[in-house]
């Protein structure tokens, strides 16, 4: 396993490296965007596995911790602030391997996806 998955926080360059390693099936982890749906639609890091809005954490935290306790999880948001707060919250709930993407999407130079909408 990559030493990066043992860190408390990673920067955008390290996230890009982990995404590359995951694409090569050399590491495994979940990348979760904790922003709101409207933010996610405007653009998100290619490779995000789930959108789990931080504003709804009380609806998903217990089940999430129960089902992913043995998996490495990287949380990302706009700047790393929300993901940092949720990291502490999930660790307090018992999840042992939650990593904050410090700097968030605003510091990310890799591939960004957007959700295109059909014109009304």
Image (cartoon, grey):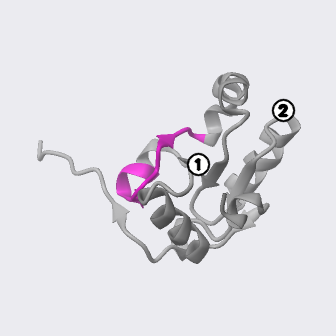
Which element type, helix, strand or loop, lies under badge 2?
loop
3D distance between C-alphas at marks 2 and 1: 19 Å
**Disc 2 and disc 1 in contact, CB within 8 angstroms:** no
Seen at 84% across and 34% down, the residue is: 94
Is-magenta flag for residue 51? yes
The residue range painted magenta reads: 39-53
x then y, percent, for residue 12: 58, 73
Up-down: is 63 above or below 76? above
> For mark 1, does the 10 Å Cα neighbourhood hold few (<14), some (14 to 19), or many (20 or more) residues?
some
Residue closer to the observer: 64 or 21: 21
Seen at 12% across and 42% down, the residue is: 120
x then y, percent, for residue 15: 57, 67
Which label sits on residue 93?
2
Up-down: is 61 above or below 5? above
Which quadrant would residue 65 be assigned to in this image? Answer: top right
x then y, percent, for residue 62: 73, 24
Per the image, the residue denoted by label 1 is: 29
Is-magenta flag for residue 105? no
Which element type, helix, strand or loop, lies under badge 1?
loop
Residue closer to the observer: 63 or 16: 16
Seen at 71% across and 55% down, the residue is: 99
């Amino acid at each position: 396993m990559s030493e990066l998955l043992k860190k408390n926080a990673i920067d955008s360059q390290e996230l890009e490296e982990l995404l590359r390693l995951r694409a090569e099936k050399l590491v495994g982890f979940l990348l979760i965007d904790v922003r709101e749906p409207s933010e996610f639609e405007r653009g998100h890091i290619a490779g995000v596995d789930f959108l789990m809005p931080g504003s709804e954490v009380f609806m998903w935290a217990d089940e999430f911790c129960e089902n992913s306790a043995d998996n490495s999880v990287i949380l990302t948001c706009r700047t790393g602030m929300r993901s940092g707060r949720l990291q502490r919250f999930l660790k307090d709930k018992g999840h042992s391997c939650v990593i904050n993407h410090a700097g968030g999407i605003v510091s990310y130079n890799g591939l960004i996806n957007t959700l295109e909408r059909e014109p009304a």
